[in-house]
Image (cartoon, grey):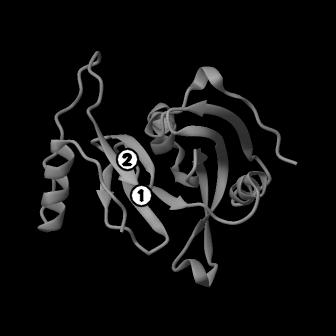
Amino acid sequence: MFRRRLTASAAALLGLAALGLPAAASAPLQDDEQPKTVEVAAGDLTLTVPESWKKEPAANRLRLAQFVIPAPEGVEDETELTVFGGFGGSDAANLQRWVDQFVAEGREVTVVQGKGREGEYKLLDASGTWNAPDGPPMMGKTVRKPDSRMLAAIVAVPGQGNYFLKMAGPEKTVAPQIDAFRASFGGDKASEKPFELK
């Protein structure tokens, strides 16, 4: 289980979820209105996420937190944000593992490194045809999903180790979430520089 540090509105949402009740739909935002956010602690990583990112119970013991991202009208495939504790291997190796989930032909990838509220981080933005997991991870099955996008980050919390965040799904769903994804772990775009994968 992971520790939580939540605003009152977030606690109310979680209370509804515990009772098996749906949270009320949020009213549409005005053009000049900022989306409301909640804080969620996953281990020693504090995330600040939009209220519209629906928090769900972790699907397995490896996940510290998971969210479903709202899809635009007409998009059926689900987009999920998952948060994990650190895995073995170098940052470059883990980033490359995510890159390799996309078919090489037509793949577009950028990787940057920066420093933000939670510590130093590396941020991957990949798009193209994604070999999306299909069924339990241990089965290793995938299904090709064209027009997909993935945002993934490795965040090094000082004295606590690495945390991995991964959002993947249809391009139309993920593209509008880039700023919110970076803000979730306190990323600072002005501090970012290219990071070269070997």
Crowd around label 1: few <14 · some 14–19 · many ≥20 (10 Å): few
Q: Nearer the viewer, residue 164 or 19?
A: 164
Is residue 130 left or right of 81 when viewed as pictured?
right
**Image point 40% across, 72% down: which residue?**
59
Q: Residue 56, image x and y in percent?
A: 31, 62
| Number of numbered discs on residues | 2
The residue under label 1 is which amino acid type?
Glu
Q: Looking at the image, which residue sits at the far front? A: 159
Residue 173: quadrant of the picture: top left
Marks 1 and 2, how far apart in space?
7 Å
Crowd around label 2: few <14 · some 14–19 · many ≥20 (10 Å): some
Which secondary structure, mark 2? loop
Residue 104: quadrant of the picture: bottom right
State whether residue 98 is above or below residue 8: below
State whether residue 97 is above or below residue 124: below
Res. 69 in view: no
Is residue 17 left or right of 90 when viewed as pictured?
left
Sequence-first tag of 1 and 2: 2
Indicate which disc residue 115 carries.
none
The residue under label 2 is which amino acid type?
Ala
Which secondary structure, mark 1? loop
Is residue 103 left or right of 147 when viewed as pictured?
right
Q: Residue 91, image x and y in percent?
A: 73, 52
Residue 28: quadrant of the picture: top left
Q: Looking at the image, which residue sits at the far right? A: 198
Residue identifier under label 1: 78
Residue identifier under label 2: 71
Q: Residue 37, image x and y in percent?
A: 29, 36
Instruction: Verify CB contact (< 8 Å) between mark 1 and mark 2.
Output: yes
**Image point 32% across, 43% down: which residue?**
39
**Image point 30% across, 54% down: which residue?**
4
